[in-house]
Amino acid sequence: MIKHISIFILALTCSTNSFSQTYASQGMVVSDNSEASKVGIEILQKGGNAIDASIATAFALAVTHPQAGNIGGGGFMVYMDDASNVTTIDFREMAPIKASSTMFLDENGELIKGSNHNGALSIGVPGTVAGLYLAHQKYGKLPWKELVQPAIDLAKNGVVLSYTLASHAKRIDNSNSPEFLKGLYLDNDGKPLKFGSIWKQRALAGTLELIRDNGKDGFYTGPVAEEIERYMIENGGIITKKDLLEYEAIQREPLRGTYKGYDIFSMAPPSSGGVAMLEMLNIMELANLENVPFNSTEYVHLTAEAMRRAFADRAEHLGDPDFNLEMPLDKLTSKEFAKNRLSNIDLEHASMSDSSQFGQLYDGRNTTHFSVIDKDGNAVSVTYTLEQSYGSGMGSEKLGFIFNNEMGDFNPQPGYTNSGWLIGTDPNLIAPKKRMLSSMTPTIVAKDGKPVLVIGSPGGRTIINTVFQTVLCFLEYDMSINEAIEAMKIHHQWLPNKLVYEENKLSPDTVEALKLMGHDVQARKTLGRLMGISIDKENGVNVGASDSSSPDGGAVGY
Ligand code: GLY
């Protein structure tokens, strides 16, 4: 399904930044870095399938997009094959065996400010290599080695340093920045590498070679595991060789919902993304949006109120399913529950966020998403992350990759919640070998068993809302993939009780009207960085679009 709306009509109904879409009849890869997208396409052209292309793209992003592309972090994959089977792979990081629910508290039981996001204790046991390896074992077609090799070539031979990464290099300060990032971006004289210079990562190439030759074991055992343990001991971390040996990626059932005849497949816990998005889509489906123009005051109010409710439910109920056996997922994603949630939305006034629990606005630049479709119609949606941009900023010079700081996604202080960003509810407290709750929402929308949309985004808790609104714009407001990605987004996460909107994309009248309804509104430059593909099987066209907020992103097809 490709929707053609003239730019003239569109200009009347929504604001957009860019109208660039890429069309391809065979395969398509859309990622935050066009070099990595090209690597994926080359794999497809060699006869690889969408899983192969995803693995190669993920390893390439670990080289070309080190802010979030990674082998030291974790993430989720949603996969739909050409026979309509859908599955997911959970490669979320895990708390080390020595972790505890009070590990970030001082002797008075107070959170040591920033401790859960800084230093070696903030690092979770990485899952990316195990996840990609599991995907390959189950569904890959080309040899593993051929999928890792392109990333090795990029790291060894070097890539041209992009303007974006050169600007990151300039911000690396010789005294205060993490040693690892200095090694990444400063030359032998301690000067930042320049835009356009050839940027090589030899240590990373060496680690990737071990992964190429030994698969998952190349990371979780042997010299890499030895060095990770040594580095942790030296830097006050607690990850051991045993943690690495025992880490496992897990294949899980996808979460499935519907919207007006379309099937929505997304990630189940330990991500909260699928549950919260389905709850919001169900509310919106019942809200008769046919009579609600996109971007109108009523539209923004309704979506914000749906978000408020879904995020409150997220806080109360969701965490690692292996530790929370009674999560009411069926209830939260049911149409009946949405009816209940919709029934108390006051169309004239903002609701209260009155329980003293969670909220944290993240920077939208962390995490990264890519979408893949191959010529046979196999679709892959992957979001993976180091948590914050460049994760912990820490890494061993010998290994060349950056460690995540994903322990910051756990609730850090048991029982303590406030109206700011802290939440202390039980389902997401730290425990050994537990996976921290995520907001990543890799999603595939299908019609009659065939994918029509592959989509996802970075952005911390804003991820759920940006993916939700993009799906809504595509299905309900009949936008093309690019229009849906560029369309105005808002964010509300219950607490803090703020309605964030993309500046210059809402009319001042609407902003004023929302204030009068009682919303505490706050402008923000952009929300999300969506990477999507729409698939028109009937006409044999795939359309890819990378968010205009991604400076190095690219949709590449053939
Ligand atoms: N670290 C971002 C997330 O998993 O939601």
Image (tube, rainbow, N blue to C red):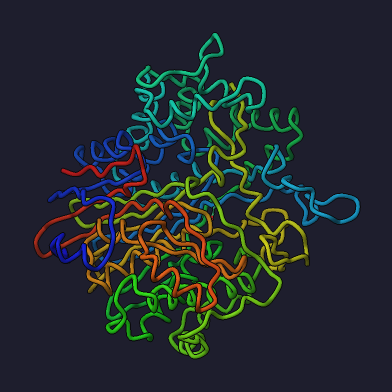
Give whichever of 478, 211 is nearer the camera: 478
For the point 33% across and 41% down, which residue is it? 553
Is 480 displayed left or right of 59 in the figure? left
Give whichever of 171, 476 is nearer the camera: 171
x and y percentages locating residue 344 in the rendered image: 52, 89
Considering every residue shown, the one lying at the far right of the view is: 107
x and y percentages locating residue 380 in the rendered image: 33, 54
Look at the image and tell me in which quarter the C terminus lies. top left
Give whichever of 250, 505 is nearer the camera: 505
Query: Vertical placement of 148 versus 131: above or below?
Result: above
Considering every residue shown, the one lying at the far left of the view is: 539
Is 247 displayed left or right of 535 in the figure? right
x and y percentages locating residue 329 in the rendered image: 53, 76
For the point 53% across and 59% down, which residue is it? 461
For the point 56% across and 20% down, which residue is it? 183
Q: Which of the 4 image quadrants contains residue 60?
A: top left
Look at the image and tell me in which quarter the N terminus lies. bottom left
x and y percentages locating residue 402 in the rendered image: 56, 33
Is 502 displayed left or right of 50 in the figure? right
Query: Vertical placement of 272 versus 392: above or below?
Result: below
Give whichever of 367, 51 is nearer the camera: 367
Is 59 displayed left or right of 44 in the figure? right
Query: Vertical placement of 292 versus 85: above or below?
Result: below
Considering every residue shown, the one lying at the far top of the view is: 189
Q: How many labels does the image show?
A: 0
